[in-house]
Image: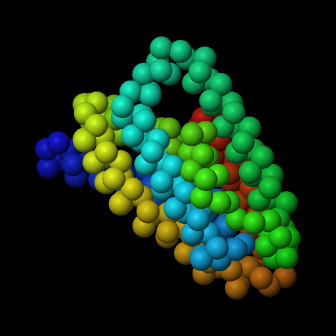
């Protein structure tokens, strides 16, 4: 990979990782509802699950969707259903006591979520169709590692923002309104996938 292509890839990894999407919205909500430390398993699960998905896509998994479009369509609708369920769960955790009664997403659940996350698939497929063409395992592993190094601080930023808002959210109905807003935004994040 040339220096120019590497710089462009790093910029793509940063922009796609820092912009709002299902993972970032859920980490923000978890940071508010549970705090930074309690959300770490969720955060590391997102990063590890996405890196694993990147390796699979880089080794040719995306070609399966080209050969069998029905498989892609099925994954798209399963992902949409799961995101709607998560949005409903976030929106229902209104008060601080209700929110804390629901445990934060764990490592394995967050890692598995990447496989039905439409933004994660877009990021993975774009990384390999635009920036890296080879199906060479060392290169694919390097791309996944580089993406994880860029992605992890971006995810941490959203989680930290949520944990910093936690005290302010505990006043009155703010947290309930915030959770309703986060649930709604998660539903809105489905729009690009379903149109």
Tell me which residue sits at (79%, 73%) in the image.
100
Residue 109: tell me if it is visible. yes
Q: Left or right: where does residue 136 sit relative to residue 96?
A: left
Q: Residue 134: x, y in percent?
A: 25, 31
Tell me which residue sits at (35%, 40%) in the image.
127
Q: Quadrant of the N terminus?
A: top left
Tell me which residue sits at (62%, 23%) in the image.
73
Q: Left or right: where does residue 176 sit relative to residue 117?
A: right
Q: Is 140 drawn above or below residue 104 in the view shown?
A: above
Q: Left or right: where does residue 61 sit relative to residue 98?
A: left
Q: Is 65 drawn above or below residue 151 in the view shown?
A: above
Q: Residue 170: x, y in percent?
A: 77, 82
Q: Left or right: where does residue 147 sit relative to residue 78?
A: left
Q: Residue 17: x, y in percent?
A: 45, 55
Task: Residue at the far left: name it.
Answer: 2
Q: Residue 160: x, y in percent?
A: 55, 75
Q: Quadrant of residue 193?
A: top right
Task: Residue at the far top: name it.
Answer: 67
Tell me which residue sits at (80%, 52%) in the image.
88
* Total count of labels: 0
């Amino acid at each position: 990979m040339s220096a120019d292509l590497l710089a462009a890839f790093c910029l793509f990894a940063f922009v796609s990782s820092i912009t709002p999407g299902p993972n970032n919205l859920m980490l923000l909500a978890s940071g508010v509802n549970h705090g930074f430390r309690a959300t770490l398993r969720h955060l590391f699960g997102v990063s590890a699950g996405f890196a694993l998905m990147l390796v699979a896509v880089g080794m040719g998994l995306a070609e399966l969707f080209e050969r069998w479009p029905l498989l892609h369509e099925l994954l798209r609708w399963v992902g949409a259903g799961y995101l709607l369920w998560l949005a409903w769960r976030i929106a229902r955790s209104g008060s601080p006591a209700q929110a804390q009664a629901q445990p934060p997403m764990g490592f394995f659940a967050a890692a598995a979520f990447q496989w039905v996350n439409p933004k994660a698939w877009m990021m993975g497929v774009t990384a390999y169709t635009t920036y890296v063409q080879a199906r060479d395992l060392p290169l694919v592993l390097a791309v996944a590692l580089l993406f994880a190094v860029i992605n992890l601080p971006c995810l941490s930023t959203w989680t930290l923002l949520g944990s910093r808002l936690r005290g302010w959210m505990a006043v009155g109905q703010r947290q309930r309104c915030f959770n309703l807003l986060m649930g709604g935004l998660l539903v809105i994040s489905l729009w690009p996938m379903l149109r």
